[in-house]
Amino acid sequence: MTTLLRDLYASTHEFVRTFGAFQLFFLRLLKDAPRILVRRPGLVIKQVYNTGALSLVIIMVCGFFVGGVLGLQGYSNLARFNAEDSVGSVVALALIKELGPVITALLFAGRAGTALSSEIGLMKATDQLSAMEMMAVNPVRRVLVPRFLGGAIAMPFLVAIFSCIGLFGGHVVAVDLLSVDVGSFWQQLQLSVDIDDIREGFYKSVVFGIVVSLLAVWEGYNAVPTAEGVGRATTRTVVISAIAILILDFMITAVML
Amino acid sequence: MLRRSAFLPINRYYGPALDDTSENLIEIRDLMYSRGSRVIFKDLNLTIKRGEVTAIMGPSGTGKTTLLRLITRQLVPQQGVIFVNGVDIASLNRTQLYEQRRRFGMLFQNGALLTDLNVFENVAFPLREHTNLSNRLIRHVVLTKLHAVGLRGAADMEPAELSGGMARRVALARAMVMDPDIVIYDEPFVGLDPISMGVIVRLVRRMNDALGITSIVVSHDVAEVSTVADRSYLISDGKVAASGSPDELNNTNSELVRQFMHGMADGPVAFHFEAPNYAEQLLGRDAE
């Protein structure tokens, strides 16, 4: 019993300590972010390219098929009520408010998040961060902040692209394959989607971008500097990001209803 | 990590600080550092003279790299003081520390080249970060440094394309690019072929003399270090076991120094890590 309590205390203590360190780390990144954006925009643009542009293919392919599946499911279910003309609004609302931000964030964590944490972890393991320190270059400013900003900036654009391609996929399936009237598809879509829906999707994309990028740089920076340590950090980035995305999605949806 | 006051007894006096024209560029007084329950340094005293090549030697695991990290304030001593250029390095804030580090060049064991930059950009990195030199001037400086290490032709190569020796030479060019006062070499001879080793040994000496810098070489390659060092320190059991010129160390009567300098298996430094009785362990009796 005593051992159990001691273990529980140690775990709680460790969790609180780590969570506090994580928040301080976030504040440190935020503090240096304006300086890097103004003085070293090239570093940030390079990371927007690395995390955003290089994720485009996977985002577009997945967006197309998610939109296609929504078109199929929407059509088959709405057809029971003779409401298949509304498939445009089902596809659009599901993509813009929910699936666009969530699936993009999950894919982003898998593609860009893991790349960020493993890159930073390897830089640590091979003394590159120590070498920067020894060259009087602050690695937090030079390495972490641009990567964090790059990921956070890229995410809303990726979500927008995912949703647009998803709509195209839904259109191809519903209109071209299942013969839903094209006018009805777009008219229903325009009638059902308003600016609040787009705003909700945008807020989610911003929050997910910040959270996934933050978790990726945190895990990479705190990785044990060995091959196994970097591997574990990469895995943790995906697992914790996925959990955080789904919990935050629920919270934001609840707040914005 | 930087809150040194948490470790230092405030009533302890470590002697007067050096001024920055002192003959001793680095002075370590009563250094104590431990990791967990393992004491790495215990009342270590050591001075590094301006303009000399100083070798720090010792058996594996004696904390040679840790000592370098303490000198460069990547680690903070738990007791004692380290003066660098007349300044207690542990008392500096981050800005002051970075000012001080601009006077250092450090060659890491594995080179620590930045993998997202090519050879040219690796050497140019400190210049781009700390100066407003034009691209043309940076190009001249970088090519000069690369030429000095014989790798001007490799300027466009990526770090992954370099051999270990080449990477070490690029890292040396990068360490020298800001014309530092102190250059620190962490195991510069490990894993090098004889030609690369000879080149590095000569470079260490030549750059030290030509540029008037102070060099610290951490190594256990006794033969190579002896050809290049003005003064050597042998560290064992957390203290300086012996010091002097390579000749003095070679001719000493100390058993420990003779064992180390001549690579003998028998002597005060045990080859085997502490372990239970071999025969008992093989027979499985150690678990009983």
Image (cartoon, rainbow, N blue to C red):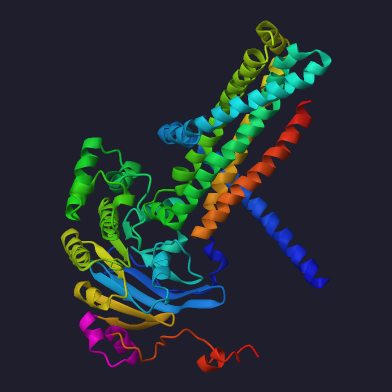
Q: How many marks?
A: 0
Q: Is residue A98 visible?
A: yes
Quadrant of residue B3 within the rendered picture: bottom right
Quarter occupied by the N terminus of chain A: bottom right
Q: Quadrant of the C terminus of chain A?
A: top right
Residue at horizontal 61%, vertical 92%?
B285
Q: Residue furthest top?
A: A183
Q: Position of residue A69 (x, y in %)?
A: 67, 26
Q: Nearer the viewer, residue A69 or B268?
A: A69
Q: Is residue A144 shown above or below B105?
A: above
Visible in this render: residue B93? no
Image quadrant assignment for residue B31? bottom left
For the point 74% across and 59% down, the residue is: A12
Q: Where is residue B244 shown, x and y percent of the image?
A: 26, 81
Please indicate whether residue A7 sits to the left or right of residue B176 in the image: right
Is A208 a magenta residue?
A: no
Q: Which residues are magenta?
A: B245-262
Q: Which residue appears at 64% of the width and 28% of the height?
A: A66
- Residue B39 image point, x, y percent: 51, 78
Q: Give the x, y percent position of residue B187.
A: 32, 68
In the image, residue B42 sits, relative to residue B99, either above or below, namely below
| Residue at point 27%, 64% (across, down) | B21
Question: Which residue is more in the foreground, B120 or B100?
Answer: B120
Q: Magenta residues: mostly which secondary structure?
A: helix
Q: Quadrant of residue B149?
A: bottom left
